[in-house]
Amino acid sequence: MHEDNPSSVPVDAEFLAQMDGAYTGWGDAAKRLREALANNELQLYIQPIAKLGENRFVMAEVLVRLREEEKKMLPPGDFLPVFEQHGMMPDLDRWVVSQMAQCIARHAPGGFRQFSINVAGKTLQDERFPEHVSRTLRQFGVPAQALCFEIDEIDVLGRLDAAAQFSAKVRSLGCQVAIDGFGRRSASFAPLKSLRIDYFKVDGSITRKILSSDTALNKLRTIVRVAQTIKVGVIAEFVEETEVLVRLSALGVGYAQGFGIARPTLLDSGSAGQ
């Protein structure tokens, strides 16, 4: 005779939904997120990316925060998992594209000509998302070259077919594509056979260690060699030290991003949602 396993006891779905609300402090989390999107309660920030050797910023990554009580800004780790849990990441990604297009149409935030936007794995599988991008760009008269979409390496590995189709569609519009967090998990360049990209964004786990780890240094050298061969750019993420920046330049890395370059700043008064 076996003892009952508590984990095998069925749990009421409504009870779990209530507990989700209690955990986040939002009650009905899905409703809260829909309201945030409808009322523009999310705020966009941008973090500059520098072109090494020319000492100038050439593009910026778009980051999202959620305004909460007392104008407190919640970091992505506090609300993006809730968007993911409720299958709403494509809705959020659409919102970011729409808001950025409106902002770019009014003026060039920070003087940048290109902005990189992260897209979720579920968004890659949304066949209507590229149509939304195309329609939004036409609506606001924004050139497609103003947007670069970042696909996380994890999603490239787990959703290669969807990532390849997404990349082909948005690049056909004139947008660019980057693999974000490159080198974090992948031990092969094989996915590049079917995935057309414009940039590798080298993961910080590599960038931070190039002065102390031969393994990290060799990985970066290999990435740069492949990038030069297939003619794509290399962006080093999480650059925080001058010594690292100097070494990156010497290794042939073209671009760098991180607190050692510039911190994220609130999109200015002409920004999205205003």
Image: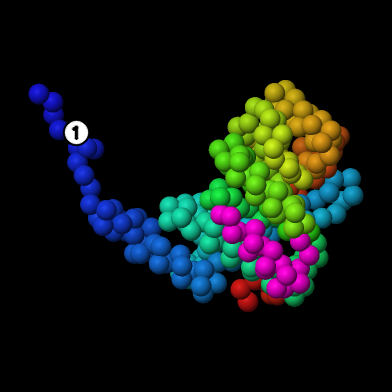
Work out whether residue 110 or residue 88 is closer to the camera in this orientation and state it.
88
Instruction: Identify the magenta region.
Output: 126-144
With respect to residue 62, does 69 lie above or below?
below
The answer to if 128 sits in the magenta stretch is: yes
Crowding around mark 1 (Cα neighbors within 10 Å: few <14, some 14 to 19, many 20+) is few
| Residue 6 in the image, given as x and y percentages of width and height | 19, 37
Instruction: Give the residue at x 9% y 24%.
Output: 1
Q: Amino acid at mark 1?
A: Asn
Question: At 67% from the left edge and 28% from the top edge, which residue is drawn?
Answer: 188
Q: Residue 20's quadrant in the figure?
A: bottom left
Main SS of residues in magenta: helix
Q: How far from the left and from the top, in percent, is residue 237? A: 70, 43
Q: Looking at the image, is 70 positioned above or below residue 162?
A: below
Residue 120 visible (yes or no)? no
* Visible residue check, residue 228: yes
Q: Name the image quarter holding residue 44.
A: bottom right
Q: Is residue 137 left or right of residue 68?
A: right
Which residue is pictured at 69% across the width and 48% down the height? 167
Q: Which residue is mark 1?
A: 5
